[in-house]
Image: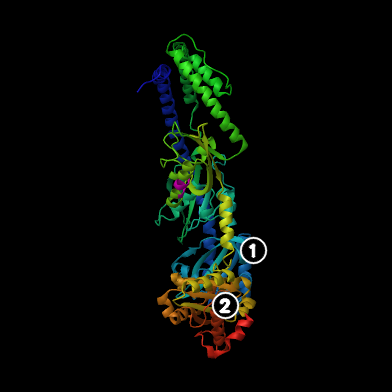
Amino acid sequence: MKIGLKPLLSLILSVTIIVPAVIIVLTGVSASRTQAVQSVTNEVNALSLALAVGLDVTLDESVVSLQTLSRLDEIKQTADHNYGMVESEVTALFEAVIAVNAPYLLDIIVADASGVICIDSFGSMGKMGLMIPDFEEVADFAKNETFISDIEISNPDYGGQSTFFVLTGIYDDSLHGYISMVYSTAIFTKYLSDVGLFEDYGSMFVTDRKGTALGLDSSSAVRVDQIGTPALRDIVNTTVNSGREFTAAQLSSGSFVGAYGVLSGSKVTLSNNWFWFGVYPISAIETVSAPLMIMIVVVAVTSLIWAIFGFIIIKRVTAPPREIVKKMHRINAGDLDERLTVRGVDEYAYISESFNEMLDEVLISGEMHRAISELSDNMLFEWDFRRESLFVSENFLNVFEIETERATLLNGRFMDSLMEKEDNERFKVDINKLLRNLDSMHGEYQVATKGGSVIWVSIRAHCVLDRLGELLRVVGVITNIHNEKLLSLQLSERASYDFLSGLYNRNTFMRELQSEITRSATSRVGVIFIDVDDFKFINDKYGHNTGDEIIKCVASIIKDKLGSAGFAGRFGGDEFVMCVTEEETLNNIDKLASAVLELFDKGYHAKDFDVTLKIKASLGIAISPEHGRDNETILAAADEAMYFVKKNGKSNFHIYNPDDSVLSELMQSI
């Protein structure tokens, strides 16, 4: 490998002066950084442990109050549904406890042993049917120890505040029930917002067992997946998912240092413990000390002096080639008329002359390409047929990754290398046709970009011929038409589908049905007409949103059961149609209808009303060619069969029979 004089001398200078200086500086900075990080880590550890005691005290006050209440006879009688006898005493007791704990204690709830709420601090007695939140999950824990729940963000029962509750059992010789105190998370966020670690760079926060954070950046409750800082999100995820018990431990995540531990209370034992975190960003740590800074400056100045001296020598040694370098810089700066001065007949003169000739040719080609580029934002390419060299514009290289030095229009390393098989073959056919006819071409293809995405492009190319009609160059333009192409495809697709159900709309279904009947002239095609029974009642009672969900549920069942055996459509409202084309399914079309009705009968669970709505429907079946040889006739027959079911009890299916009614009258009404 040949190395130029100037690079060689620069390398020697770097090895002897600059590299040692850099090593010294980096070693010092690394040592100083390690020491600074360890110092801050120790301080954050100590301070976090001290602040965690304050959090425990805050929690202790809540738990002790709760355990005191659980021992009172009035509370036990209330849990035994004898609250009428002690209503005034319990009400006064609740008011006193809430007044002491205001404004953070939002509610006190007493429930019987099955979790049914007996009374709350608002004076609501005997709330039969209402239960303590998450009772089945927490009851076993609360029988033997005090339980602290996860955080509920924006609790609608308490004015949209974020809340948590503390629960314990009410005992003497047996379990009477449970008592729970509902707190606003502000009891912790207020404490945490007043805490600052090291000029507020660090922070102290707590999370429940699912990672919902309180006090992070002085904010209210934030779910773990919404924590803005990825490193903190990873810390919380790792800790809460560890599934193990631990006391305070040192924290080091790569981005933060500090400590973490379990928020368990200093006087009581809690189930479902929360976690506390004291974190400090490593980026905020001052890592370079004053003595080290002085050393860095001294080393840098000394190295700079020696480097300047060395580069002066290098400059003098490399004086002969400097004229070429200057000329090239001027040309690159835009002075395209600049040329090398040719002196004598030595090698330098030969190089200068060849360089000037090459520059003249490049200038002509460059002017042409620049003119084209200025007229359009499109990507340009030019293939020199005789030299087999490829030129592409700068914006082309920003979008596509191609080795232009090795690519030609015919060797498969140009745009076709970025295409899938179908477009690749079509592009090669178009290019061969272009070179054969020496004319122009235009095509649209899908190609892969540098980023790995696939976009639609339009490629236009034109042959440039010499005076004898021989091919000189192929010039072309590439246009990104991805958005326009997708919009065209989306508009085409949307015009064929019903937006709510995702099934064919009426026009598309009728067209596809006729096409299938025509194509299957010698075989059978089945149609099932489906009408949802009492759909208006569902809309009126549960609202149009629930009605829309029913439509989606029906469509999902139809698509699932039909599978690849045919296609389906929605005619609007509560009317659906299935076309069965697969012979085996068609032979058992009654079983398909029964299976659809069975899935409908399982119903749809409306979350807004917490009720499962059974879906009833009437199905009419008709088969071509027995019941008709065109889409209108076969559909009318299926519709007539569906109305036969409607008239005879609904929620069933029926295969069309001409004796059921007069088909011609039905066709006139459709």
Residue 54, numbered circle: none
Would residue 193 appear left or right of 176 to someone viewing this image? Answer: right
Secondary structure state at the residue bearing disc 2: helix
Secondary structure state at the residue bearing disc 1: loop
Residue 632, numbered circle: 2
Residue 429 part of the magenta-drawn span? yes
Region in magenta: 426-430
The C terminus lies in which quarter of the figure? bottom right
Which comes before the other along the chain, label 1 or label 2?
1
Residue 512: x and y in percent read 53, 70
Q: Nearer the viewer, residue 293 or 272?
A: 293
**In the rendered view, how is the structure colored?**
rainbow
Residue 2: x and y in percent read 36, 21
Residue 129: x and y in percent read 56, 77
Say which quarter of the image contains residue 89: bottom right
Residue labelled with disc 1: 159
- Residue 389 visible within the image: yes
Residue 361 part of the magenta-drawn span? no
- Residue 184 visible within the image: no
Q: Three-letter amino acid code at disc 2?
A: Glu
Q: Main secondary structure of the magenta part?
A: helix
Q: Nearer the viewer, residue 168 or 259?
A: 259
Q: Up-down: is 365 above or below 647?
A: above
Q: Going by the picture, which residue comes out furthest to the top?
A: 344
Q: Three-letter amino acid code at disc 1?
A: Gly
Instruction: Mark 1 and mark 2 in contact? Answer it, CB < 8 Å.
Output: no
The label nearer to you, 1 versus 2, is: 2
Residue 515: x and y in percent read 51, 70
Whole-number angstrom distance, CA of label 1 to CA of label 2: 58 Å
Q: Nearer the viewer, residue 196 or 307?
A: 307
Q: Identify the residue shown where x is 48% and y is 16%.
A: 353
Q: Residues within 10 Å of mark 2 (few under 14, many from 20)?
A: some
